[in-house]
Amino acid sequence: MATRRSKRDAAEKKMTPVQMEGGRKTSRMVPKRLRYSPPLAGPQHGRKHVVLFTWQKWTPVQGEEGVRKSSRIAPKRLLYSASLPSALQQTRRKRKKHNIENIQHEEKDSSHVDNTDTEVTNVQRLSAYELERLENIRQNQAFLSSINLFQASEDLKKSSAKQPPSQRGLTRSIAVVKEVLPSRKSLRLQNKEAEVFTLPPEPNKTDVRKQPKKPAGPLPLEPVNMAEGSKLPPQFLQLCMEVSSKERRVELDLEEYCSSLKKMTISEDRVVKIVKERIFSAAFHPTSTSFLMAAGDKCGNVGLWSVVGNWGDHGVLLFEPHTRPVCCLAFSRSHPAQLLSLSYDGSLRCMDVEKGAFDDVYNIEDGLKTFDFLSHDCSTLVVGDWYGNLAIVDRRTPGTSHESHHSLDPNVLRCVSVHPLQQQYFAVAKSRQVSIYDLRCLKKSSSQPVSQLPGHSLTVSSCYFSPCTGNRVVTTCMDNYIRIFDTSTMGTEAPLLTSISHFMKTGRWLSKISAVWDPKKEDCLLVGGMSRPRNVHVFHESGRWLHMFKDEERLTTVLSVTAFHPARNAILGGNASGRLHVFSD
């Protein structure tokens, strides 16, 4: 092996440089490359092709004489001679031609020529699977166009677009331009000595929650949304003093009643902003000639709105008799010109239009929650507070104190309702209980109820006797059920007649939903809904659903506070932005 290798090395040293096509030789030494020699031919050789690779010196190709020469040693490469087999040369030519054609096609595609030619070229390149996919897409689009699905989609987008709220009623306050103050400089930059301040005493935690109350005594009846010193419009005074007609109403059967509900609609002029903040309570005036409504909001404001009025802001007059939420409102049945309002600030006031003042009826430190009338002339009231106490108040007695005070529960009394006929009985909604008490058997503390209404698993937000006979009590509970009890006989436990499933979780920013009776037909009740589109439901005491009030253009919010008109076919609903919605025939 050593002898063969030495002979081969000696033969390689004697080899001369390769002469290229230019015929020019070079003395520049570069790494030798493997040279591919042409196949040997002749009968003297047993094989058809012999491939021989040898190391040779590199010589420049023709046309490279101007290239700068360098002594840098380049890497070794395999050098194939020009005398390649004809089949291999033809293959390379075809590949080169194919590459040139592809480059030309790409240049045509990138240039902005005729679009149709480009699409045809792209389609010709697609595979059978992609062509089939495009055909399926085309057929699907043709089918969707035939059933007008695209048009229906556009109409749905337009209908689902959020409608702007009504601009009728109280207008938004004009933004006050802030005064531009000079830039502040530290005392150090002003070359002044630091001032020594003493920290103020820490405020009492019990005083932080309290807001200053209105001064005790009568308050002037002056609307805040009218010019200072302006008097109430005479038409408004006349409307407030109207008494509802005493004509006997015709009792409708259930089918006629449903037909009358379907005739009730809402229009643009029946939506108005009556107070500034979230509505906590609302009521209809008993007049039958026109619609006059009252609402109380979160900040202690009371608004009155007449649909046909042209005073104030689109018939709205705003008053400020309280400083905290007005959670209960009611017009006097015997004196329609009087509106009683109760607030968390501990005050119960009577707006007397004839006197032109807000009179003090009952006043404590804070925490009043609910009230109801104990007599037909509305002179005696039963009042509940946040601390589980019940007070009997007589408006004819001078002063603002109670006649008697009773502790019924350590928790809050959320609602009080008096029996319409046997007015010694009243129902009280506590935290998770509803009890019926007898006024004649009340004690200072530990009073025993006459009857219990069991079955509530969470907080009860309201309870009301049926308005004509008092044979039914409807309760609204946060366990998402409206329950109707039979109270025709005051037993130890009132039997449950119906449970209606209804979503009640309003959250923190909405007023609690409560079911209320219709004074014209006491076996039907009204309740707001949380579902979309926003609506208000009417149910029968048997649990049968009767009607749903909705309007996707004008009713776009939750109406938590609802009420029936006592004499006409109309309902109202109040939302969290201070707007009232009225449906009427």
Image (cartoon, grey):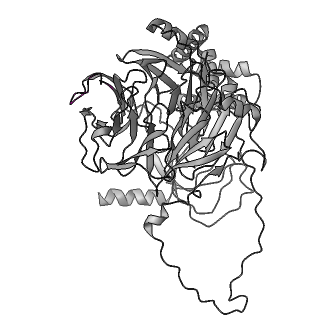
Closer to us: 356 or 144? 356
Residue 195, above or below 218: below
Magenta part of the protein: which range?
484-494
| Image position of 485 (left or right of 104) | left
| Image position of 308 (left or right of 360) | right
**Residue at the (51%, 9%) spot, across then down:** 250
Quarter of the image where one finds residue 439: top left
**Residue at the (58%, 86%) spot, across then down:** 197
Task: Give the x, y percent position of residue 160.
Answer: 60, 26
Task: Give the x, y percent position of residue 174.
Answer: 75, 50
Residue 83, above or below 15: above
Residue sitting at the far front: 397
Quarter of the image where one finds residue 198: bottom right
Task: Give the x, y percent position of residue 285.
Answer: 59, 29
**Residue at the (43%, 19%) spot, across then down:** 522
Residue 269, above or below 40: above
**Residue at the (71%, 19%) spot, across then down:** 117
Closer to us: 152 or 81? 152
Q: Main secondary structure of the magenta part?
A: loop
**Does any portion of residue 565 appear in the rendered image?**
yes
Residue sitting at the far left: 492
